[in-house]
């Protein structure tokens, strides 16, 4: 999207980092849409050699602001403000300032920030409006249980208590050529894990079956997203003799 490219000076990048970066982990929005869904999915970019997830640097922010890439930030891996949405092909500016990065950052720096105590006071005694809270359940009414084995068509081989195959999300990025990043519990195929760190959301998206998000309410938090199916397979559940070590291959 060359027409949307602009220059982001170092002070703007530093301000952006200060305002919006909580964690160094980030996601990247794919430049090319998935053929089946025509959607531009987000994935965790990884180091080609070590397979480790990449960490945000000021240069990542500069490239995001300048429009070369589009990143998601935690929070919830949501698109970083002022980035270009790769499907919509446009930037979304904040109201209240001119549509250029210098003016936008100046504006964002000037607005008062809410601290933890103020936020606690603000939400005290409030609850989620009932129309957006659904009762807690494992999957949505009418949605059949997702079984990953129904959607995998790469060869499976058995390692310990798991079936092992190529991770579809890694495969999208041309990784996991050895075809063994994804472990699926034989006992309970609803449990699966990618050793290169793909989330189950990324794996399901890569298979063309993205999850339906369900809002639940509980005592700890009133705005938690859970998923209609589970991938509770933890690294400890992989028996010795299965994939082990750092598991970071790709
Ligand atoms: Zn993977």
Image: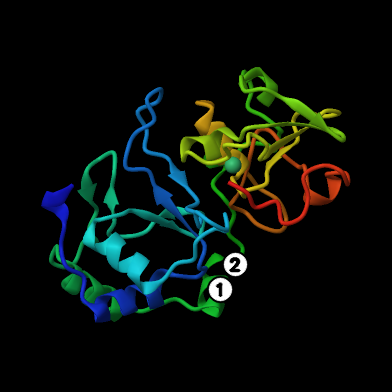
Front-lying residue, 223 or 31: 31
Q: Tell me the tag on residue 121.
A: 1
* Secondary structure of residue under mark 2: loop
Q: Is mark 2 within 8 Å of ligand 1?
A: no
Q: Label 2, on which residue? A: 124
- Whether residue 146 appears in this view of the structure is no
Task: Residue 145: name its quadrant.
Answer: top right
In the displayed structure, would residue 161 be above or below residue 246? above
Coloring scheme used: rainbow
Ligand 1's quadrant is: top right
- Across and down, in percent, residue 107 comes to 23, 74
- The residue drawn where x is 30% and y is 74% is 13
User: Is there any visible trace of residue 167 in the rendered image?
Assistant: yes
Judge left or right: residue 69 versus residue 93. Answer: right
Residue density around tag 1, few if under 14, some if 14–19, many if 20 or more, within 10 Å: few
Residue 206 in the image, given as x and y percentages of width and height: 51, 32
**186 lies left or right of 94:** right
In the picture provided, is 234 more to the left or to the right than 85?
right
Q: Position of residue 214 (x, y in %)?
A: 59, 38
Tell whether label 2 touches label 1 (CB within 8 Å): yes
């Amino acid at each position: 999207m060359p027409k949307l490219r602009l220059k982001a000076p170092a002070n703007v990048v530093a301000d952006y980092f200060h305002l919006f970066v909580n964690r160094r982990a980030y996601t990247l929005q794919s430049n090319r849409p998935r053929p089946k869904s025509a959607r531009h999915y987000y994935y965790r970019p990884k180091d080609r050699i070590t397979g480790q997830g990449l960490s945000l640097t000021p240069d990542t922010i500069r490239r995001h602001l300048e429009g070369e890439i589009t990143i998601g930030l935690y929070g919830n891996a949501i698109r970083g403000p002022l980035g270009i949405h790769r499907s919509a092909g446009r930037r979304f500016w904040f109201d209240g300032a001119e549509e250029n990065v210098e003016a936008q950052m100046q504006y964002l720096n000037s607005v008062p920030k809410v601290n933890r105590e103020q936020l606690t006071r603000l939400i005290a005694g409030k609850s989620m409006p009932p129309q957006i809270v659904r009762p807690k359940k494992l999957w949505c009414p009418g949605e059949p249980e997702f079984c990953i084995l129904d959607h995998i068509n790469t060869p499976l081989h058995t390692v310990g208590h798991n079936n092992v195959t190529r991770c579809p999300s890694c495969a999208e990025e041309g990784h996991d050529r050895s075809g063994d990043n994804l472990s699926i519990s034989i006992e309970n195929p609803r449990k699966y894990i990618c050793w290169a760190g793909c989330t189950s959301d990324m794996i399901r998206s890569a298979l063309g079956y993205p999850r339906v998000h369900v809002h639940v309410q509980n005592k700890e938090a009133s705005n938690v997203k859970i998923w209609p199916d589970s991938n509770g397979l933890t690294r400890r559940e992989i028996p010795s003799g299965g994939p082990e070590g750092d598991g970071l291959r790709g």
